[in-house]
Image (tube, rainbow, N blue to C red):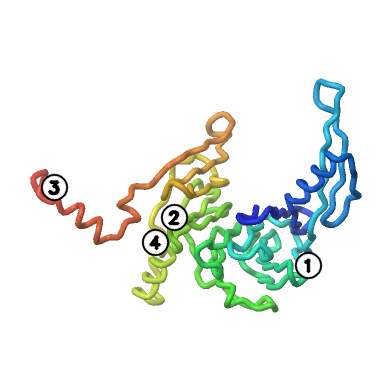
Amino acid sequence: MCPTEPFVLSGGKDKSVVLWSIQDHISISAAADQGSTKSPGSGSSSVKQDSKVGGDSTTMSPSIGPRGIYQGHRNTVEDVQFCPTSVQEFCSVGDDSCLILWDARVGFNPVIKVEKAHDADLHCVDWNHHDDNLILTGSADNSVHMFDRRNLTSGGAGSPIHKFKGHSDAVLCVQWCPHKSSVFGSAAEDGLLNIWDYEKAWKAIERIGTRTRSTSPGLFFQHGGHRGKVIEFHWNPSDPWTIISVSDDCDTIGGGGTLQIWRMNDMIYRPKEEVLAELEQFKSHLNTCK
């Protein structure tokens, strides 16, 4: 859903992205109250009668037509996302390994199409609410890519400005942190939910140059409390650094899956100097314990 306007995006196995307006539902509901009916079509609605369960009376159920149908993917559309600063711009990813940017003001064709955003199917996408140039994608190739749309062209050229590799299985969900612009999370079929800071990743790259290292640059926390693949998670926008996550571990716990609400220790994400200053008061205690 669009955070500022009554718009909804959907994507499906028909390879299309569809734009809807809740306002159309409100309009047809008002018309239904007045006893009028409209024909279905683009941006229009019709009214159907459905019987109530357990009774003979009927209710008016609106059927809403789409505002626009956008064709550009060659396989199932897995995820869609609105631009945080424009209700007319949105992006989508799919099983064709493509990341597509759309603009409803210029028509129904892709504005930018990155043909090979990953080496496998794309499962998820998220647009940074602090910097609308940055877009995250997660893929079956076990990685998260970060794109800067200023580097992309209408011809599909462009490559990720950073690749985050810290999962051992397909990435199913990515989401930017609402409280810090450089932080995001990724959840995967390996049962882990990773928390990243791309500023830390860039500092690490600058420090070590092109040398390889055993750990993943930018990764500063892993939540390993789930016993199955983590299929979805969300940051709490009102309670900083609190996350809700769900996993598909029906086979291991007897069905139903698991939902967890959790928060990492604040010393993990607070500035290093601040944490060291706080720990200084315990220095004498630690020396005594030795």
61 displayed left or right of 290: right
Q: Is residue 227 above or below residue 175?
A: above
Residue beneath disc 4: 215
Residue at 11%, 43% in the rendered image: 289
Question: Residue 34 falls in which quadrant of the image?
Answer: top right
Q: Which mark is residue 195?
A: 2
Q: CA distance from mark 1 to mark 4?
A: 43 Å
Residue beneath disc 1: 108
Residue at 72%, 55% in the rendered image: 11
Q: CA distance from mark 1 to mark 2?
A: 35 Å
174 displayed left or right of 157: left
Q: Secondary structure at mark 4?
A: loop
Marker count (numbered): 4
Q: Amino acid at mark 2?
A: Ile
Q: Secondary structure at mark 1?
A: loop
Q: Amino acid at mark 4?
A: Thr
In the image, which is nearer the foreground, mark 3 or mark 4?
3
In the image, which is nearer the foreground, mark 1 or mark 4?
1
Which of pointers 3 and 1 lies earlier in the amino acid sequence? 1
Residue toward you, 161 or 2: 2
Q: Amino acid at mark 3?
A: Leu
Q: Secondary structure at mark 2?
A: strand
In the image, which is nearer the foreground, mark 3 or mark 1?
1
12 displayed left or right of 169: right
Q: Which mark is residue 183?
A: none
In the image, which is nearer the foreground, mark 1 or mark 2?
1
